[in-house]
Image: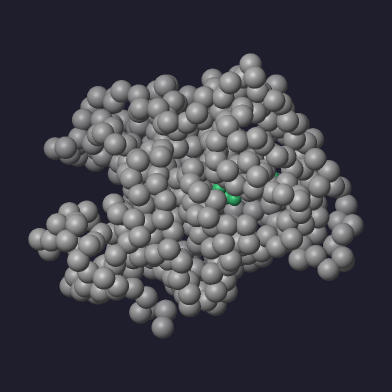
Amino acid sequence: MRKSIISMQWLFPGDYMGFTRRQVLGGIAGLAVVGLGAGGARIWLARPQVAAEHDYELIAAPMDLELVPGHQTPALVYGHRFPGFEIRGRQGDWLRVRFTNKLDQPTTIHWHGIRLPIEMDGVPYISQPPIPPGQSFIYQFKTPDAGSYWYHPHLMSSEQLGRGLVGPLIIDEREPSGFTQEKILCLKTWHVDEQGAFTAFSVPREAAREGTRGSLSTINGVATPVIELPAGQVTRVRLLNLDNTVTYRLNLPGCEAKIYAIDGHPVEPRDFVDQYWIGPGMRLELAIRGPAAGQELSMRDGVVRLATIRGVEPTKAGSADWPAALPANPVSEPDLEKAETINFKFEWVGAMTDYSQGQQAPSLWQINGVAWQGGEEHKHSGPPLAKLELGKSYIFTLRNMTQYQHPIHLHGMTFKVLDSNRRKIIPYYSDTYLLGKNETARVALVADNPGLWMFHCHVIDHMETGLMGTIAVGDAWCG
Ligand code: C2O
Ligand code: CU
Ligand code: CU
């Protein structure tokens, strides 16, 4: 059973066997499966409700992975591989994913960082009913912003993400970016023992602190891999932290690198200096100049080596020039003069008092005095933390009253990070802000997407033990 899962395939627009796109999309009603030969790969053709330019079939299913040499880990994956199948769209185009759940438990897919309609956001009960085992759901939406994003379930998250249901979602710029080569590096630290068996994804004692850490650091599912970069040439390196818990303290000693985008959104290119902390859910896009052929450098998390960077022969397509800044995404600029300020306090409850009250998880954390009560399945979520008027600008003051850092994430909208009492910030756009111990930071946004949007810490066991709520925009909540 496990081995017979069909991988998801990309329909290349305008390029199937001599048909034009229109002929295929308009001329074949219903479902057709077309064999492609090698490896039993197949594509799925159907008449989409909209003219999807980027059309995928995606299956979530169990698959054994060899993370620890000589041992099998009973993972759950997307598209019969880990990291999950690389889904690519193009800025301003439609993306369509026909998703089938071949797990033995319900699931959904959330498209982290993408500004989309609430019905496509993949939050159970709020966006859609959970997708039961054996069922399919079609996700389709436009992708307004170019950049590095990712996808994952939004229920039973510590287990489903923990076992491997995470994948990259890359939205290409409308025009060539100037980069001629790229690499996607998905960071994950697995909760496994020396035999590859899973250990607990969430332990209350750890959930009450920095979160439950795994023990095996990997990049694209491999412990301390070698990353080959063409010598002297510039490669776009997309780093995605798809981990439940770990904030990677990324450093690249001896390496020539520049930051081009943070959490999907372009920044003015600047030298990568010292360290950059990538919290769970966050992304960093670098341009790295490959070291001389044969030379090796290391990519590290603090003092721990994550990977070896090795210079290899330059390629024909490659270039030694640093590309110009990436074009800005069309995110609405908040009006700071007129903006209303809303305060959010993130607190530790300090005792596992509610543990026995029939809850699935203890309440350890609160936002503005309220611990998330919706449970892992997001049922009975209660009133939103804030109600925003459609089209209005807001400043959120985020105050961390705790000794642990929290990557604070908002669905549905992109905010502008303004300032912090702890560090110097060059304002930039993001969907996740890593709020340090006792830090206060301000972010601003235009409430331009109606819906009930999740607002939570992306340390998964913090989120499941209280650090989650909703933000209503427009009349999404009438309670
Ligand atoms: Cu990656 Cu609710 O988010
Ligand atoms: Cu999200
Ligand atoms: Cu947290």
- Numbered disc total: 0
Residue 103 spot, x, y in % from top left: 51, 74
Q: Identify the residue at horizontal 83%, vertical 68% (top origin).
A: 358
Q: Say if 216 sits above or below 91 in the image.
A: below
Residue at 29% x, 65% y is 47
Q: Examine the rendering and report whether any part of residue 224 can be seen.
A: no
Residue 16 spot, x, y in % from top left: 16, 61
Residue 264 in view of the camera: yes
Q: Given the current orientation, which residue lies at the most extreme top position?
A: 337
Q: Horizontal placement of 410 versus 79: left or right?
A: right
In the image, 153 versus 394, the foreground residue is: 394
Residue 52 picture location, percent across and down: 31, 54
316 relative to 221 in the view: left or right? left
* Farthest-out residue, bottom: 1
The answer to which quarter of the image holds residue 125 is: bottom right
Q: In the image, what residue occupies the spot 38% across and 38% down?
A: 146
Residue at image point 64% right, 53% down: 460
The way the protein has been coloured in the rendering is: one colour
Percent from the top left, x then y, of residue 159?
A: 61, 65
Quarter holding the N terminus is bottom left
**Residue sitting at the far left:** 18
196 to 52, vertically: above or below: below
Q: Which of the 4 image quarters holds residue 106?
A: bottom right
Ligand 3 sits in which quadrant?
A: top right
Direction from residue 8 to residue 216 in the image, left or right: right
Depth check: 81 or 70 in front?
A: 81
Left or right: where 456 falls relative to 216:
right
Position of residue 438 relative to residue 304, above or below, is above
